[in-house]
Amino acid sequence: MKFGVVIFPGSNCDRDLIETLSNISKEPVVELWHKDTDLKGVDFVFLPGGFSYGDYLRSGAIAKLSPIMQSVKEHAAKGGYVMGICNGFQILCESGLLPGALLHNTSRQFICKNVYLKPVALDLKITNRLKPEQVLSIPIAHGEGNYYADAATLKSIEDNNQVLFRYCDKDGQINDAANPNGSANNIAGICNDGRNVFGMMPHPERCFADYLHNTDGKAIFESIVTEVGSLV
């Protein structure tokens, strides 16, 4: 299994992702520059968090025009795996690889803190090591994390079991008080209907090791390495 991380101008979580993936997979991780079009034979493409192109216009609106994104779209269309975290999730929505959009937080403030997540779809490549009632503590750091989709799209996502995670409280209860940004249905992450493109606002790469004083994100990456790796 060969992993690649796309680096845009303004990415600031690329090193975190590279460190996490190389640590868990024990394999080198390929750095993919946004101006290139060659994915260098990677099986799984990651779009990291940060502020691509300074988040001008809308978060991800300029990054979607980077040359490498056409290759990422082609990779996904062939069934290749793609995952976007935070700004990467925003880029995937702007690119049309995932439905919906990420709007400004309802508080109109940038939020940086640990939140609680409950996994929903457990049969996916990034969730197969998680348990149904498990509650994860994962950091968020965003100003535009409010997931929005029109009623028809939202119903389709829910009916097709495309929700990855929902914001919850420490006891796993899903309610408005546990929703940090106003996301529809407390959605913290989704996948496409092909189940090979994934996006989430929280940062599991920031909580994968003991030295980070939180390892709740590790199971997500172990799911990717174990399950996807076994299929290649």
Image: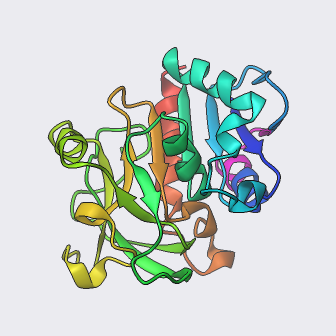
Q: Residue furthest top?
A: 78
Side (left or right) of 173 relative to 27: left
Q: Is residue 170 visible?
A: no
Number of marks in picture: 0
Give residue 213's quadrant in the image: bottom right
Which residue is at a point 69% across and 45% down the rendered structure image? 62
- The stretch in magenta equals 20-32
Where residue 218 sits: x, y (%)?
A: 53, 59
Where residue 82 sits: x, y (%)?
A: 55, 35
Query: Which is more toward the observer, 216 or 56?
Result: 56
Q: Is residue 221 above or below residue 209?
A: above
Q: In the image, is residue 111 part of the stretch drawn in magenta?
A: no
Which residue is at a point 20% across and 38% down the rendered structure image? 156
Where residue 127 sits: x, y (%)?
A: 38, 47
Quarter of the picture holding the C terminus: top right
Side (left or right) of 73 relative to 10: left
Side (left or right) of 139 relative to 20: left
Query: Which is more toward the observer, 6 or 150?
Result: 150
Query: Which is more toward the observer, 149 or 117?
Result: 149
Q: In the image, is residue 21 part of the stretch drawn in magenta?
A: yes
Side (left or right) of 228 relative to 169: right
Which residue is at a point 65% across and 58% down the rendered structure image? 49
Give residue 5's quadrant in the image: top right
Where residue 114 sits: x, y (%)?
A: 49, 81
Which residue is at a point 38% across and 40% down the rendered structure image? 99
Q: Is residue 182 above or below residue 205?
A: below
Q: Is residue 29 above or below residue 193?
A: below
Q: Is residue 68 visible?
A: yes
Give residue 131's quadrant in the image: bottom left
